């Protein structure tokens, strides 16, 4: 089979294709002939030595895929060879064949193509659990979505619209027309506009109910100012650690030094909450993932959600996919095509 590995830490070109032996599923596992793999910012950070818990090079990479079941290990029920599925696969999905625990494999909704299946597991479950499990978002609330034009952002917009929630989104100016078409009520150009001022103006100084923020320390401080009473700020990444295509120690130190601190008494007196979310650290809470998948499947059947694919790269150009993401060119999801790889 074909695999993409991080040969060493560095720029996108350190991603290389290598041949490997096709795995045999063990008890409780499913072997998938992978067709497409999603690209996530966490994989960019792993390549740059910025993702805690990632394996050391040379190592495989990738967290989600979609394809056809090729073989099933013992003690697995509810699946059949030839079935279309999508799956989580921690640090192993950039490959033509993926072995995944059965509990991390999901039937592909009839409404989704295989391409869309690769754009679903990470971003939709991330967005759903932040908005509804942590954020307790309800009809009539207002949500602020940072990075609204990315994979998690577009997923969150679709879910919020299904409940008639008012949406504020930050994104580069060129993405605003698309965001408005999706139903974003207030678009903010974070590069040239005062986010706090525009949020206060849109909400009549009330503030927002939920914020999802993957940006970094400086942005988290600003987001906190945008919260209303009972508001919740949910942090799920630190994109500001990434400048350029290689690890910049000065940037990393500066970012870590700038991390905000929140005092419990201040949080109590202001009736605000700060939360963190990390999909890769959900071991032991698989029941919560299953619950989210069932809710998302219902949304898909009802037509509320449909993954947005921005660009498909051949598996031979994984470096191009990472570079495209780091240059902030995508609106929606970037995926890698393994359908012709053996």
Image: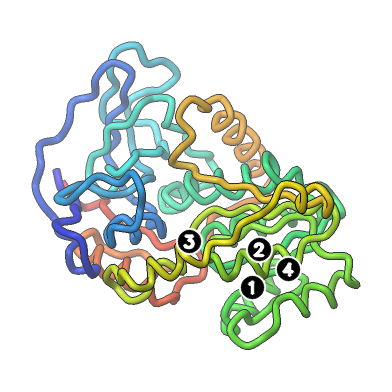
Task: In this rendered view, identify the residue nearer to me: 18 or 239.
Answer: 239
Q: Kindly indicate whether the residue at mark 2 contacts the one at mark 4 (C-beta within 8 angstroms).
A: yes
Between the residue at mark 3 and the residue at mark 2, the CA separation in whole angstroms equals 15 Å
Return the disc, 4 or 2, that comes first in the chain's sequence.
2
At a point 59% along the width and 61% down the height, the residue shown is 260
Residue annotated with mark 2: 145
Q: Kindly indicate whether the residue at mark 1 contacts the one at mark 4 (C-beta within 8 angstroms).
A: yes
Q: What element carries label 3?
A: loop
How far across and how far down the image is residue 7, in percent?
14, 56
Return the disc, 1 or 3, that comes first in the chain's sequence.
1
| Quarter containing the N terminus | top left
Q: Does residue 142 appear left or right of residue 87 in this picture?
A: right
How far across and how far down the image is residue 303, in percent?
67, 49
Return the disc, 4 or 3, that comes first in the chain's sequence.
4
Q: Is residue 128 above or below residue 334?
A: above
At a point 64% along the width and 79% down the height, the residue shown is 176
Q: Is mark 4 on a helix, strand or loop?
A: strand
> Could you classify mark 3 by the number of other residues whose Cα lies within 10 Å: few (under 14), some (14-19), or many (20 or more)?
many
Residue annotated with mark 4: 168
At a point 46% along the width and 71% down the height, the residue shown is 330
Residue annotated with mark 1: 170
Between the residue at mark 4 and the residue at mark 2, the CA separation in whole angstroms equals 6 Å
Q: Kindly indicate whether the residue at mark 3 contacts the one at mark 4 (C-beta within 8 angstroms).
A: no
How far across and how far down the image is residue 105, in percent?
42, 31
> Could you classify mark 4 by the number of other residues whose Cα lies within 10 Å: few (under 14), some (14-19), or many (20 or more)?
many
Between the residue at mark 1 and the residue at mark 2, the CA separation in whole angstroms equals 6 Å
Q: Is mark 1 on a helix, strand or loop?
A: strand
The label nearer to you, 1 versus 3, is 3
Residue annotated with mark 3: 238
Q: Does residue 20 appear left or right of residue 322 in this picture?
A: left
The residue lying furthest to the bottom in this view is 192
At a point 58% along the width and 47% down the height, the residue shown is 276
């Amino acid at each position: 089979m074909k695999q993409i590995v991080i040969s060493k830490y560095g720029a996108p070109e350190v991603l290389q294709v290598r041949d490997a032996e096709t795995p045999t599923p063990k008890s409780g596992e499913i072997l998938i002939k992978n067709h497409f793999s999603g690209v996530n910012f966490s994989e960019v950070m792993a390549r740059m030595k910025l993702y805690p818990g990632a394996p050391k090079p040379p190592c495989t990479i990738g967290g989600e895929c979609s394809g056809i079941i090729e073989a099933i290990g013992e003690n697995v029920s509810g699946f059949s060879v030839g079935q279309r599925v999508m799956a989580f696969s921690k640090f192993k999905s950039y490959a033509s064949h993926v072995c995944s625990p059965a509990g991390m494999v999901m039937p592909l909704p009839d409404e989704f193509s295989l391409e869309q299946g690769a754009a679903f597991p990470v971003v939709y479950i991330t967005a759903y659990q932040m908005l509804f499990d942590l954020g307790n978002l309800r009809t009539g609330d207002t949500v602020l979505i940072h990075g609204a034009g990315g994979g998690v952002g577009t997923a969150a917009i679709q879910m919020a619209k299904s409940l008639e929630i008012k949406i504020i989104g930050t994104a580069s100016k060129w993405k605003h027309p698309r965001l408005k078409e999706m139903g974003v009520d207030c678009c903010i150009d974070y590069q040239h506009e005062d986010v706090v001022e525009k949020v206060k103006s849109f909400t009549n100084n009330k503030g927002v109910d939920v914020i999802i923020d993957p940006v970094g320390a400086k942005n988290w401080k600003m987001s906190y100012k945008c919260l209303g009473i009972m508001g919740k700020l949910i942090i799920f990444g630190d994109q500001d650690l990434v400048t350029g295509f290689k690890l910049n120690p000065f940037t990393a130190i500066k970012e870590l030094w700038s991390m905000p601190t929140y005092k419990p008494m201040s949080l109590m007196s202001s009736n605000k909450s700060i939360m963190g979310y990390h999909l890769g650290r959900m071991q032991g809470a698989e029941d919560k993932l299953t619950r989210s998948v069932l809710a998302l499947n219902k949304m898909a059947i009802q037509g509320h959600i449909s993954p947005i694919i921005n660009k498909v790269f051949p598996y031979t150009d994984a470096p191009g996919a990472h570079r495209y993401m780091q240059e902030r060119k995508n609106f929606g999801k970037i995926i890698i095509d393994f359908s012709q790889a053996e």
